[in-house]
Image (tube, helix red, strand yellow):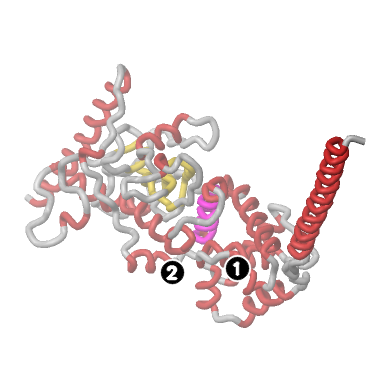
């Protein structure tokens, strides 16, 4: 055999053996890596899961104990109502709304959980500790009560009365000039937790993320209408226009009646606004030598006094339900529904507890102070045809009221 050919075959054989050794080494390394990965995955899966709280009746027993043995003031601070009103509301939820106890959670515990969260601005974790429940159970109780309170809204939303309100009828300052007034209407901003790309539309003039809630009330401090969910950047006049034209939850003003509004709204026959560029707020008339100097100022003074009822009810509402002092940690849809549910609770308590502790708290904290609306911030509506005529008629009507008030005041002084 040729020596050169023999040497070439040996070199080729050595290369083949080397490739086989390298291939076997690669396989060993790959198997080692796969083994390490498998051990890591196994260790991750072996992380101990949170032990779920066992289902008991401890939460029910706890609230029953508080109803019987807790001091009334302490119970009221915790759950924002007296024990009698609490038990009566539980009966309503059972008999009228068909809410039932579960095997371990009673209606009383469900309601107490909801009230504790909205009244104290407490998080689920605090309710878990207080009622000895899992987060799932707390969430389920909260959403059950939210759902039935929303369903109660048509019954507990006060209806505008046709008779002259007592507050107006019993005062010569207001009667007969405001005898057809059924209450006041305004917007309030409630802080909101917003996610996504629409942050700018929810940012109000103060730079805070909020929803603009339009509400109407009567002089008994009861809500007669609520529309929640509008972005914080929306102007009150725009929200009012939506309330008047929407198909569901439409604002209805009784024939011949009207609400009082501030300068942020246009003056209409159904919405009586004050004279602009004229002294208006109550503090503007306090002190010696600050009496009304003309018919427009004389009109604005009692108008401001009566319209202040809407500021007071907002103050009471936010003082009773502290969850609205901050952005509620829920999806936006739930935040919107929460406003209506708490309005139902407010009206229920106005009927059950006429002496309202939270009215004093609201006034003491200064939350019931009305905001000044500057002329340049007023969003004028586009007037066309009959709308322009209606505005002229409404302004003439307001001027007539002011002139009658001024004439009567001059006659009394002479």
Frontmost residue, 117 versus 46:
46
**Does residue 312 show up?**
yes
Residue 25: mark in rendering: none
Which of the 4 image quarters holds residue 123?
bottom right
* Element class at badge 1: helix
**Does residue 162 show up?**
no
**Residue 94 placement, left or right of 252:** right
What residue range appears in magenta? 337-350
**Residue 55 placement, left or right of 255:** right
SS majority, magenta: helix
Question: Could you tell me if the residues under marks 2 and 1 are in contact, i.e. CB atoms within 8 Å?
Answer: no
Residue at x 9%, y 61% (from the top left corner): 288
Query: Circle 1 is placed at which residue position?
Result: 125
* Element class at badge 2: helix
Residue at x 37%, y 53% (from the top left corner): 166
Furthest residue toward top: 385
Which of the two discs, 2 and 1, labels the residue nearer the N terminus?
1
- Give percent across and percent down for residue 82: 55, 71
Residue 357: mark in rendering: 2
The quarter of the rendered structure image containing the N terminus is: top right
Furthest residue toward front: 2
Q: How far apart, in angstroms, are the residues tagged by discs 2 and 1?
A: 28 Å
Frontmost residue, 309 versus 245:
245
Residue 96, above or below 270: below
Frontmost residue, 233 versus 6:
6
Q: Is residue 346 magenta?
A: yes
Furthest residue toward right: 1
- Give percent across and percent down for residue 188: 38, 49
């Amino acid at each position: 055999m040729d020596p050169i050919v023999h040497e070439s075959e040996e070199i080729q054989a050595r290369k083949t053996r080397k490739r086989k050794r390298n291939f076997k080494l690669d396989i060993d390394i790959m198997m080692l890596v796969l083994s390490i990965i498998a051990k890591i995955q196994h260790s991750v899966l072996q992380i101990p899961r949170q032990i779920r709280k066992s289902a008991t009746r401890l939460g029910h027993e706890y609230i029953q104990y508080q109803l019987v043995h807790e001091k009334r003031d302490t119970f009221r601070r915790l759950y924002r109502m007296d024990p009698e009103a609490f038990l009566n509301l539980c009966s309503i939820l059972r008999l009228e709304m068909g809410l039932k106890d579960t095997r371990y959670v009673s209606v009383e515990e469900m309601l107490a959980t909801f009230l504790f969260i909205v009244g104290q601005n407490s998080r689920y974790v605090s309710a878990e500790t207080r009622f000895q429940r899992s987060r799932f159970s707390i969430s389920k109780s909260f959403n059950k009560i939210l759902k039935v309170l929303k369903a109660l809204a048509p019954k507990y939303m006060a209806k505008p009365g046709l008779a002259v309100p007592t507050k107006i009828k019993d005062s010569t300052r207001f009667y007969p000039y405001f005898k057809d007034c059924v209450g006041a209407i305004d917007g309030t901003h409630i802080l909101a937790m917003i996610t996504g790309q629409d942050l700018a539309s929810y940012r109000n003039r103060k730079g805070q993320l909020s929803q603009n809630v339009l509400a109407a009330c009567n002089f008994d401090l009861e809500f007669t209408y609520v529309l929640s969910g509008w972005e914080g950047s929306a102007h009150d006049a725009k929200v009012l226009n939506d309330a008047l034209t929407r198909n569901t939850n439409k604002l209805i003003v009784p024939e011949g009646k009207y609400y009082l509004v501030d300068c942020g709204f246009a003056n209409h026959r159904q919405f009586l606004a004050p004279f602009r560029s004229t002294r208006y707020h109550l503090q503007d008339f306090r002190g010696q030598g600050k009496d009304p100097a003309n018919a427009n100022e004389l009109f604005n003074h009692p108008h401001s006094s009566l319209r202040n009822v809407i500021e007071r009810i907002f103050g009471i509402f936010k003082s009773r339900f502290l969850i609205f002092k901050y952005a509620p940690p829920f999806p936006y849809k739930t935040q919107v529904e929460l406003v209506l549910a708490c309005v139902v609770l407010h009206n229920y308590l106005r009927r059950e507890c006429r002496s309202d502790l939270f009215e004093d708290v609201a006034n003491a904290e200064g939350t019931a102070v009305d905001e000044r609306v500057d002329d340049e911030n007023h969003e004028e509506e586009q007037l066309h045809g009959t709308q322009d005529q209606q505005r002229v008629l409404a302004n003439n009507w307001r001027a007539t009221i002011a002139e009658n008030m001024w004439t009567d005041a001059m006659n009394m002084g002479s």
